[in-house]
Amino acid sequence: MVSNRGSAALAAAMLVSGCAALNPPPKPAAAIRINEDPYPSTYVRYPGVPTVIRHATVFTGDGQQINDGTIVFADGAIAAVGGPELAPPAGAREIDGTGKFVTPGIIDVHSHLGDYPSPGVSANSDGNEATSPARPEVWAEHSVWPQDPGFSRALVNGGVTTLQILPGSANLFGGRSVVLKNVPARTAQGMKFPGAPYGLKMACGENPKRVYGSKGSMPQTRMGNIAYAREVWIKAVAYKRKWDKYYAKGGDMPERDLAMETLKGVLDGKILVQNHCYRADEMANMIDMSKEFGYHITAFHHAVEAYKIADLLAANDICAVMWADWYGFKMESYDAIKENIPLVQNAGACAIVHSDDANYIQRLNQEASKALADGIRAGIPGLSEAVAWEWLSRNPAKALGILDRTGTLTPGKMADVVLWNGDPFSDYSRPAQVWIDGAEMYDANDPKKRPVSDFELGQPGEGDTK
């Protein structure tokens, strides 16, 4: 028998229960998106005029050659490319290109200008945060010194219009890279290529194990390199899972981790992996690790042994970033051949010529020329100067995620153009004029069109263009 008091308590409980059913708990707070671009580009193209270059030999950058060619650009973009019949826009500046060559601007996907600038002293050495094997939280752009004289030398001596600045290779995870337009600016953001994806510099092989092995810490071996990197990726996958859940369902925001944010960007496909790696076996190990954790390697840099696995690179859509003949300076760079670049090309993979050096960047056209000559001498089919220019513009643009905007002389793309005073595959040729987004940034015949870093003003060698 239930007492009156018990009946009242039971009724009250049922009433509360009913109210709870009628009033479900409040929904979690909506998710707040983290700003993925806190240091946006402030680049503004320099002013230009409609320009027509006639009667030049044109390498379009996508394997085509046009003899007695014409290129028209205006409002910062390529307007037309073709033969002598092309009509100029009203009021266009006409340039006679007879005996000269026109190409897309050279793109160097592996540079440390600004992070290891000239003068090369320890006070300016800002490319390696060698305090932990994993430092994906650092960003190369925060070390870039825009007044580095190397930028203007790369422009006027080498015809380089775009370049990727990478952290160094002391670490397994070296940090984010940044893509720059090679224009004078007061800040790195003023040079930053609008909308270009970030890269993640990774490294394998001798450098990380030497740097940290010498300190008596992991990694000391190649197996230590892989084990350490796998542990970091396990944390990154868990971090991504936590944030994906938060963005889907809201609630309490997870704690931010700058290192893991970069790796989450890779796992999301927004940040491109640029992987320092020399040996074929190590590149294969890195490919396996990328498949284990669900990310894609965009390019292997230095890739001295790419010729051994060119078919594997092609099958996995991975670019090989290579020198023509720089090798043998350490064991992992020993087993090189001069036909490396053309063999990668012949396998249907993405072949790229790079510098990694403040001097090499001034003659990448000559580096491509050496590789082309070695390939032809070896009887590798399908090679030509027009094809080889893909190693300097189209393929680098692909590896940086900007091929839709630059890298070839295609109508609608940025007018990043070089007029050479002769065949650019000759040691005796050099840029006569260089345009970036249709703005003339250099003219060999006009002293006022020779950029000089503020740092060099009044110093010996000011504006040296060799």
Image (tube, rainbow, N blue to C red):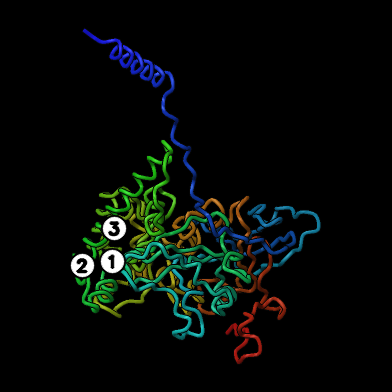
Density class for disc 1 (Cα within 10 Å; few <14, some 14-19, many ≥20) is: many
Image x and y of residue 343, in percent:
33, 62
Amino acid bearing label 3: Val
Amino acid bearing label 2: Arg
N-terminal label among 3 and 2: 2
- How far apart marks 1 and 3 lie (CA) works out to 14 Å
Instruction: Write the residue at 25% across / 49% down.
Output: 292
N-terminal label among 1 and 2: 1
Amino acid bearing label 1: Cys
The residue closer to the viewer here, 403 or 202, is 202
In what quadrant of the picture does the C terminus appear?
bottom right
Which one is in front in this view, the residue at disc 1 or the one at disc 3?
Answer: 3
Q: Which residue is mark 1?
A: 204
Image height of 262 relative to 246, above or below: below
The residue closer to the viewer here, 124 or 101, is 124
In what quadrant of the picture does the N terminus appear?
top left
- How far apart marks 3 and 2 lie (CA) works out to 16 Å
Quarter of the view holding residue 373:
bottom left
Instruction: Answer with left or right where residue 255 lies relative to residue 56.
Output: left
Instruction: Write the residue at 40% across / 64% down.
Output: 175
Image x and y of residue 312, in percent:
28, 54
The answer to whether mark 1 and mark 2 are in CB contact below 8 A is: yes
Q: Which residue is mark 2?
A: 222
The residue closer to the viewer here, 70 or 188, is 188
Q: Is residue 396 visible?
A: yes
Density class for disc 3 (Cα within 10 Å; few <14, some 14-19, many ≥20) is: some
- How far apart marks 1 and 2 lie (CA) works out to 8 Å
Quarter of the view holding residue 8:
top left
Q: Which residue is mark 3?
A: 232
Instruction: Spot the residue most to the right.
Output: 91
* SS category of the residue bearing label 2: helix
Q: Is residue 100 visible?
A: no
